[in-house]
Image: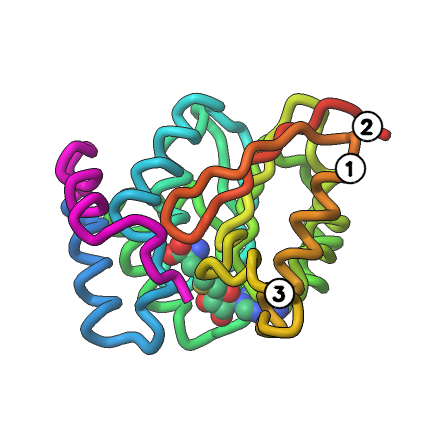
Amino acid sequence: MTQLLISKALDQYSEQYTSDEMPVLAALNRETNMKIPMPVMLSGHLQGALLQMISHMIKPKNVLEIGTYTGYSAICLAQGLQNGGHLHTIDINEELEDICFHYFCKAGLEGKISQHIGNASEIIPALDATFDLVFIDADKQNYHRYYDLVIDKVPTGGYILADNVLYDGEVVLPEEEQSKNARAIHAFNEKVRQDKRVEHVLLPVRDGIMLMRKIAAD
Ligand SMILES: C[S@@+](CC[C@H](N)C(=O)[O-])C[C@H]1O[C@@H](n2cnc3c(N)ncnc32)[C@H](O)[C@@H]1O
């Protein structure tokens, strides 16, 4: 997963001409790579800077993230929160709760981020809020479900982002050569394409980000 879609040299050049990674994010990136299984899941410098920029552009009141991992993207997405704004982030892996909280505190965000531990399919329906920005980045088989669960919690004019929508380039392989996850992601992309409630752009950044704006309630 998340092989580079552009050459290593162009990726490095893109990072070089992107604002420096905040020290707290650089430290979290390092610690995740040293101590946590599957560090490839972390958004990283370039994608993190994009998430941060999008958050600043939207100035969200409430953000929902599905898939916290070690909290890197949550810290990025929280940067553009309005005064009094809040970010809810969900992860099923309770072992990651402490490292996330440690870095949320280091980033001065402990009062602005709520961590929910458990299955996102059960937690999302229980959240009594609307979200002007949602980031879907958990188990790929359930992207379609998360989309269905959040779409009515996003007001018209709100945004949904989904990560890994090119799934390491597998989405363009013949179906019989795709992994189960790649097939699920392709089905998700098709679902978004057919949903007239959103306009969308697939950005080929890192592993592909689907950027959706809700334009109609039904
Ligand atoms: C790709 S990582 C998230 C990376 C993070 N957003 C970042 O950019 O740094 C996916 C996360 O989804 C979590 N996850 C998987 N299945 C889940 C589920 N059913 N409910 C909630 N979280 C889940 C995993 O534990 C993992 O930490």
Residue at 52% in and 62% down:
170
Q: CA distance from mark 2 to mark 1?
A: 11 Å
Query: How far is mark 1 from mark 3, CA to CA?
Result: 24 Å
- Give the residue type that dot 3 points to: Pro
**Which residue lies under the disc numbered 1?**
195
Residue 198: x percent and y percent?
Answer: 71, 31
Return the mark for residue 174.
3
Say which residue label 2 marks.
217
Lower position in the chain sequence, tag 2 or tag 1: 1
**Label 2 to label 3, Cα distance in Å?**
34 Å
Q: Outermost residue toward the front?
A: 174
Q: Quadrant of the C terminus?
A: top right
Q: Residue at x 32, y 56 (%)?
A: 4
Q: Amino acid at mark 2?
A: Ala
Asked if the magenta segment contains residue 164, the reply would be: no
Q: Residue 169 at x, y = what percent?
A: 47, 58
Q: Does 102 sit above or below residue 44?
A: below
Indicate the quadrant where residue 134 lies. Answer: top right
Q: Which structural element holds mark 1?
A: loop
Circles 2 and 3 in contact, beta carbons < 8 Å: no
Q: Nearer the viewer, residue 117 or 70?
A: 70
Q: Residues within 10 Å of mark 3 (few under 14, many from 20)?
A: few
The stretch in magenta equals 1-22
From this view, report whether residue 38 is shown above or below residue 206: below
Disc 2: residue Cβ within 8 A of ligand 1's nearest atom: no
Q: Earlier in the sequence, mark 1 or mark 3?
A: 3
Residue 172 location, quadrant: bottom right
Q: Which amino acid, by three-letter code, is at mark 1?
A: Asp
Q: Earlier in the sequence, mark 2 or mark 3?
A: 3
- Determine crowd level at label 1: few under 14, some 14-19, many 20+ residues with C-alpha closer than 10 A: few
At numbered mark 3, what does the secondary structure look like: helix, strand or loop?
loop
